[in-house]
Image (cartoon, rainbow, N blue to C red):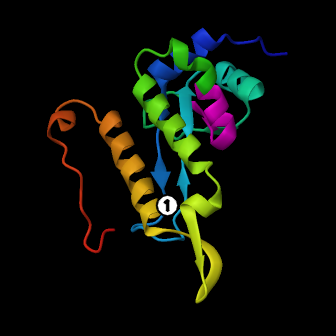
Amino acid sequence: MPQVISAEYVAGFLDGEGSVSLNITGKKPSNRQQVSFPVKCSNTDEKIIRDLREQYGGSVSAGRPLPKHQPFWVWTIQGAAAAALLREIRPFMRIKHRQADLALEYWEWSRQPREVRCCSTPDRPQWHRTQETLRKEVEFKERMHVLNLRGQAKRVWVPTVHAGAL
């Protein structure tokens, strides 16, 4: 039976060994794109990774180590479970707290009723996301990208504007 892991420990573990990101599938804004915010931690200690999954949910997969590196495991949690985790550990985060705040901001925004984020027209009766919604999703992704930059890139990054962008 796994030990209960404190929120403080999980916050420190995520700060040091984890990531919070926003992913958009697809290359350009469209109603087919999907947005997710996975929270991931990886480690060579399989037990701690499995204990995190047992306590918070999510999935565990074996990572692909580089030659001459130890095997490692990756814990991934998304959606409502990731939002609940971030709310619990946020007060104790010291490094990735801005990423957690932005992920929670995205999560709350994405939970709005579909009438706010989507539209239906006579020529297109199915609900689909508005151009404003698609633009906002890309904006969240770019803001997270800036927070996750490291080193020199952090000082010189400029948002990309795609041809045909919203």
Up the image or down, 111 lies above or below 69; here it is below
Mark 1: few, some, or many residues within 10 Å (few <14, many ≥20)? few
Q: For the N terminus, which image quadrant?
A: top right
Q: Where does residue 131 sit, x and y in percent of width and height?
A: 43, 68
Q: Nearer the viewer, residue 29 or 40?
A: 29
- What residue is shown at x 64% (from left), y 27% (from top)? 85
Helix, strand or loop under label 1: loop
Q: Please, what is the three-letter code of the amino acid marked with disc 1?
A: Thr
Q: Is residue 129 above or below residue 74?
A: below
Is 46 magenta? The answer is no
- Residue 156 quadrant: top left
Specify whether 55 is left or right of 145: right
Q: Residue 92 at what x, y percent from top left? A: 52, 12
Quarter of the figure that contains the C terminus: bottom left
Magenta stretch bounds: 72-86
Task: Measuring from the top left, give residue 10's x and y in whole percent.
Answer: 59, 17
Residue under the image location 77 percent in, 26 percent down = 54
In which image quadrant can residue 55 be found? top right
Is there any visible trace of residue 37 in the rendered image? no
* Residue at the spot of label 1: 25
Residue 6, quarter of the rendered image: top right
* Residue drawn at point x = 51 percent, y = 27 percent: 70
In the rendered structure, the answer to whether residue 118 lies left or right of residue 153 reads right
Q: Is there any visible trace of residue 47 in the rendered image?
A: yes
